[in-house]
Image (cartoon, rainbow, N blue to C red):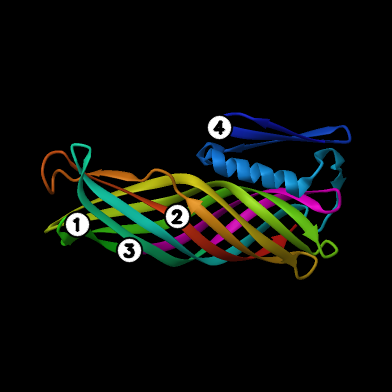
Amino acid sequence: MLYLYFTEINYRFSLQFNDRLYNFTVEYFYFLKRKIMKKILFAVLILFGSVNAFAAEVSIFAGPYVGLDVGYSKGDSRGYESLNSSPDGIFDKGSLSKFLFGGLAGYNLAFNHNYLIGLEADFETRNSKNLAQLTDSGSGPLSDNVETKIKNSYSTRLRLGKILNNDQTMVYIAFGYAGADVVKNYNVGSGSLSKSKLQNGYTAGLGVEHFINDTISIKTEYRYSDYGKGTNLDVSSLLAAGYSESSKYENEHSVRFGLMYHF
């Protein structure tokens, strides 16, 4: 039996089979917007059908695993300048694209021969950057610029899967928390200011995983990530009292390829 309990900032999943009760709490879901959550919950209902039919099963996918992944990401960097908290018409925008590399670990539970629920966490390094020219909406490009750097990224995601091909292949959806270390360098004239921030948001995607032998699997995965609120940098020391620069990294699309070892 699967019980779902919802609160404002977390989701607690209780899985009961035989005489044992297993509880899982997934934090950070308050980053998910209501419309996205409705779509995800609808997909979960389609994927699992009648939850009353669940029973614990042995599967090659079940249990702990570790792995490595490589991929490519592309996202948007946007910012605007303000005077006394009101936009003054000067903005910047750019695109960051870079290869990524990292490690992951997770744990899966299989049910009713064909279904899976799991939790996976990863850490990735990127070192991607973009230099965007400041633009005045009235007069056009300026000589000053803003540099955006993405150093590392993190995620913790719930995976819901359908097992196919005689327990050798799985298709799944995944969603959860995503974070990124973002560095902003504001360069005006001969001066420069910098600020680093861990931006917190959400990620959602889908993928396919396939076993190539009894312990090793490979996967390919697509993700969309939004990293929430950005940085607000006081630049009054470079311009004049009351000036600030607000910016964020958002709308990231990425593709990953992974190699996992299952214990």
Cβ atoms under marks 3 and 1 closer than 8 Å: no
- Label 4 near label 2: C-beta < 8 Å? no
Where residue 37 appears, as percent x and y from the top left, is 59, 41
Q: Which mark is residue 187?
A: 1
CA distance for labels 3 and 2: 15 Å
Q: Nearer the viewer, mark 2 or mark 4?
A: 2
Range of the magenta residues? 102-130
- What separation in Å lies between label 3 and label 1 (alpha carbons)? 13 Å
Give the class, few, some or many, for how many residues have Cα within 10 Å of label 2's Cα (few <14, many ≥20): some
Q: Disc 2 on helix, strand or loop?
A: strand
Which amino acid type corresponds to the residue marked 4 in the rendered image?
Answer: Ile
Q: Residues within 10 Å of mark 3 (few under 14, many from 20)?
A: some
Quadrant location of the N terminus in the rendered image = top right
Gap in angstroms between the C-alphas marked 2 and 1: 24 Å
- What residue is shown with label 2? 251
Q: Nearer the viewer, residue 42 or 118?
A: 42
Q: What's the CA distance linking mark 1 and mark 4?
A: 38 Å
Q: Is residue 88 left or right of residue 254?
A: left
Percent of width and height locating residue 187 = 19, 57
Query: Is there a contact, CB below 8 Å, between mark 4 and mark 3?
Result: no
Measure the C-alpha gap from mark 4 to mark 3: 34 Å
Numbered disc 1: secondary structure: strand
Residue kind at label 3, given as amino acid type? Asn
Q: Amino acid at mark 2?
A: Asn
State how far apart marks 2 and 4 are (Cα).
Answer: 23 Å
Characterize the local packing of mark 1: few (<14), some (14-19) or many (20 or more) Cα atoms within 10 angstroms. many
Say whether residue 255 is magenta.
no
